[in-house]
Image (cartoon, helix red, strand yellow):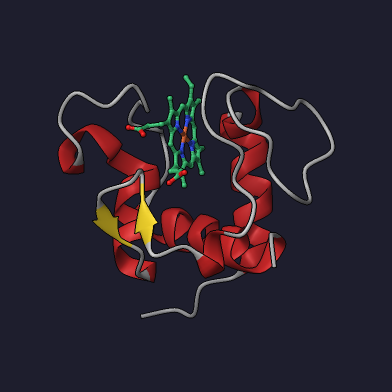
Amino acid sequence: MPVADASRGKRAIERVGCASCHTIPGIGWPKGEAGPPLHGMAERALIAGRLANRPGILARFVRDAPALVPGTTMPAMPLSEEESRDVAAFLYESGK
Ligand code: HEC
């Protein structure tokens, strides 16, 4: 399995537009407010208040949140599995 790469994750975040709904450390613009700000993901115990915060789970969540949290308003996002791991790596590193 290739090692997750935070800089590729940042590019994927910019491509699919996560920041239209989230304020994300390391992403200057936009600073969306439909979803919670994504600061300090590395220190949190839970994702979306209910999932254990581990890299594999965060990667699945950012790709297909409704599959893990039925009824969530966070949509599934057009990321490959590899990109979703890169996105998780970026979120853990960017908000420290
Ligand atoms: C259409 C708006 C929207 C888009 C686009 C979006 N999200 Fe979200 N996101 C949300 C909402 C709303 C929540 C809160 C969901 C919940 O608590 O059930 C959320 C929750 C999250 C959480 C959990 C935050 C926490 O406080 O635990 C993470 C991490 C996250 N989103 C990352 C991303 C990433 C990465 C992308 C891009 C791949 C993205 N989101 C795209 C709306 C969005």
The answer to whether 7 is drawn above or below residue 51 in the figure is below
x and y, in percent, of residue 3 in the image: 49, 80
> On the rendered structure, is 87 left or right of 45?
right
Quadrant holding the C terminus: bottom right
Q: Quadrant of residue 58?
A: bottom left
Look at the picture and state if 63 lies above or below 96.
above
- Quarter of the rendering containing residue 15: top right
Asked whether, in this view, residue 59 is left or right of residue 13, the answer is left
Using the image as rendered, state which of residue 38 and residue 87 is in the foreground. Answer: 38
Q: Residue at x 70, y 61 (%)?
A: 94
Please tell me which residue is depicted at 77% across the width and 43% down the height of the picture.
27
- Position of 85 with respect to 76 (left or right) is right
Q: Is residue 52 above or below residue 26?
A: below
- Whole-percent x, y for residue 48 in the image: 35, 43
Q: On the rendering, which quadrant does ligand 1 occupy? A: top left
**Which quadrant, please, contains the N terminus?**
bottom left
Residue located 79% across and 51% down the image = 26
| Outermost residue toward the right in this view | 28
- The mark total stands at 0
In-front residue for pair 41/78? 41
- Left-right relation of 56 to 15: left
Quarter residue 70 falls in: top left
Question: Residue 64 at x, y = what percent?
Answer: 28, 39
| Residue pictured at 61% horizontal, 29% vertical | 17
